[in-house]
Image (cartoon, grey):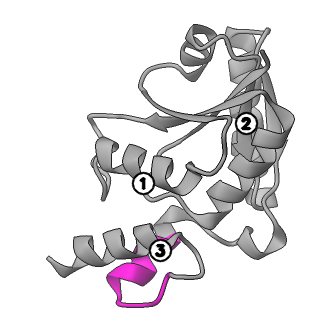
Amino acid sequence: MRRAIYPGSFDPITNGHLDVISRAAKLFDEVVVAVAFNEAKSGLFSINERIEMIRGATGQIENIRVSRFDGLLVSFAQEQNACAVIRGLRAISDFEFEFQMALMNRKLNASIETIFLMPREEYTYLSSRIVKEIARLGGDVGAFVPQAIVEGLREKFRG
């Protein structure tokens, strides 16, 4: 089985993330969406909320599994018997950081490849940070995230 890991904080998941997930699902037998947990960082949504939102948003894709992870990504990938890590590239500005990470991951475990996927053009400007800021300021984020996430953002910023 060819399994890939798509890691991220997904706080919250966006349509850009979902586009990368659906592209990766066509390339691999299984894609594990690995939701990063870091006690030192506090996100808007809890780890469990993020996992449930992702499961809801990817439920129609059969070969997707959602899992929590912490620690080294290459260790998690090895535990999952993955052959690749998927990383999304939105713009040239993402490339330098992602390239460094890919080379370091290769140094740590040369058997796990890094695959870069670009989202559709209409999602290249999207980030969870920008979506949260728009929602916090009362803007409509319906074009950027699934409806369940729109509602989750409204609840978080209402009270």
Question: Amino acid under label 1?
Answer: Met
Q: Secondary structure at mark 2?
A: strand
- Residue 41, position as x, y percentages in the image: 31, 43
Front one among 31 and 88:
31
Q: Residues within 10 Å of mark 1 (few under 14, many from 20)?
A: many
| Range drawn in magenta | 130-141
**Residue sitting nearer the eye, 18 or 124:** 18
The quarter of the rendered structure image containing the N terminus is top right
Q: Is residue 34 at least partly visible in the picture? A: yes
Location of residue 77 with respect to 123 vertically, above or below? above
Q: Give the residue displayed 85% in from the left and 36% down from the top.
A: 27
Question: Looking at the image, is 49 positioned above or below residue 152?
Answer: above
Q: Earlier in the sequence, mark 2 or mark 1?
A: 1
The amino acid beneath tag 3 is Gln
Residue on which disc 2 sits: 86
Identify the mark nearer the N-term, 3 or 1. Answer: 1
User: Residue 52 lies in magenta, yes or no?
Assistant: no
| Image position, residue 7 (x, y; %) | 58, 36
**Type of the residue with mark 2:** Ile
State the mark number for residue 53.
1
Which residue is found at the position 51% from the left and 19% from the top?
A: 72
Task: Work out which residue is located at the far left of the displayed protein and give it.
Answer: 159
Residue 137 highlighted magenta (yes or no): yes
Numbered badge on residue 147 = 3
Residue 118, given in percent of the width and then of the height, sits at 82, 55
Q: Which mark is residue 105?
A: none
- Please report whichever mark, 3 or 2, sits nearer to the chain's N-terminal start: 2
User: Position of 31 compared to 151: left or right?
Assistant: right
Q: How far separated are the C-alphas under marks 2 and 1? A: 20 Å
